Image (cartoon, helix red, strand yellow):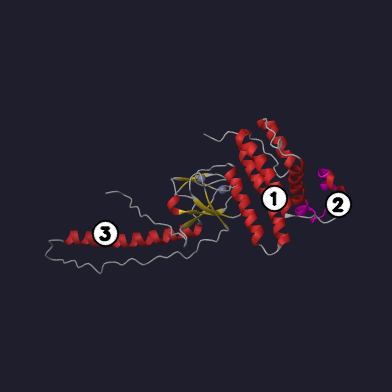
Amino acid sequence: MSRYKTFTIAIPTDADGFVGRACDAPGCKQYFKIYVPDHGDYLHCPYCGVRFSRNSLFTSPQLKYAKEAAIEEARVYAINEFQKMFKNAFRGSKNITYKPGRQPTKRAVRPDYVEREVDTEFHCAECSIRFQVYGIFGFCPGCSCENLQVYDANWANIKRKLDTEPDKNRQRRHAYGDLVSTFEVFCNRKATRVSSEKGNFQVLFDARKYFKDHAGVDMLASVTGNNLLALRRVFQKRHVCIHAGGEITDRYIKMIPEDAKLLGTKVVLTVEELETAATAMRIALGVLVKSIEQPG
Ligand SMILES: [Zn+2]
Ligand SMILES: [Zn+2]
């Protein structure tokens, strides 16, 4: 007989069939959900890309539940085993009769948590997995694809929030920030393919220089005219919104001399500019996808 007894405890899904996961990579530690029937044996964190087995990255409330449920299974199993053991031991004995007590009943162990609400659900066209994330993500947890589909999903999410948030100004500010974050996450992923050196991908021309130096490719080669201007403005406007209370600074004018007469005024954020920049960004990231090999 084995020295160990294994109990399998299923982690309950939410009402839509998703189970939460908590990445344990340092610097990430973020929460996401995956639709259970879609699981393969290995998954990836959609934010940082760490690969993990389907039987890991459970959240602490899930583990607490699993432990309690396993203890209850073990309790009932142990009582049954003892009863069997005594029955066998006293079988045929004239002096002692063993009368087992009542069959133990399993107490229902229910999770004392609910999975968190996560704002956005995606369905990967490459591997068909369904997953839910908070905000910007880097790639699909099922196939880890890091192509333009990931960019498109993030942009669709930014646009969806633009339409639904009642405070338009606040939402535009977030959308400018989210678009730059999408770029940053995407570039970080591609950068790991070409160099161990870190890049500053919150700055458009630093990103361009990085990939020129490390991959020999100019990601902005075919982004010109108004498209390039909109893209440059989105990066700089995001910067002044975060660091200068939304006011056009000298630093901004140095980066966008076209806006020199706007020095000291409040920055203007428009959906049109954001859309033009998003199109330009897609072209720039498409250049990276084409020129930097995906891992085999
Ligand atoms: Zn992660
Ligand atoms: Zn996928």
2 or 1: tag closer to the N-terminus: 2
Q: How many marks?
A: 3
Locate residue 48 relative to residue 221 in the image: left or right: left
In the depicted structure, whether residue 257 falls above or below residue 113: above
Read off the magenta span: 240-256
What amino acid is at disc 1? Answer: Glu
Residue on which disc 3 sits: 81
Please, what secondary structure does the residue beneath circle 2 have?
helix
Tell me which residue sits at (74%, 39%) in the image: 224
- Residue under the image location 38 percent in, 58 percent down: 70
Question: Can residue 191 be spotted in the picture?
Answer: no
| Foreground label between 1 and 3 | 1
Residue named by callout 2: 262
The part of the image, by quadrant, that contains residue 220 is top right
Between circles 2 and 1, the one closer to the viewer is 1
Nearer mark to the viewer, of 2 and 3:
2
Using the image, determine if residue 139 lies above or below residue 35.
above
- The answer to whether mark 2 and mark 1 are in CB contact below 8 A is no
Is there a contact, CB below 8 Å, between mark 1 and mark 3? no
In this figure, which residue is indicated by the disc labeled 1? 275
Q: Which sits earlier in the primary sequence, circle 2 or circle 3?
A: 3
- Is residue 23 rendered magenta in the image? no
Q: Residue 137 location in percent, x, y?
A: 59, 49
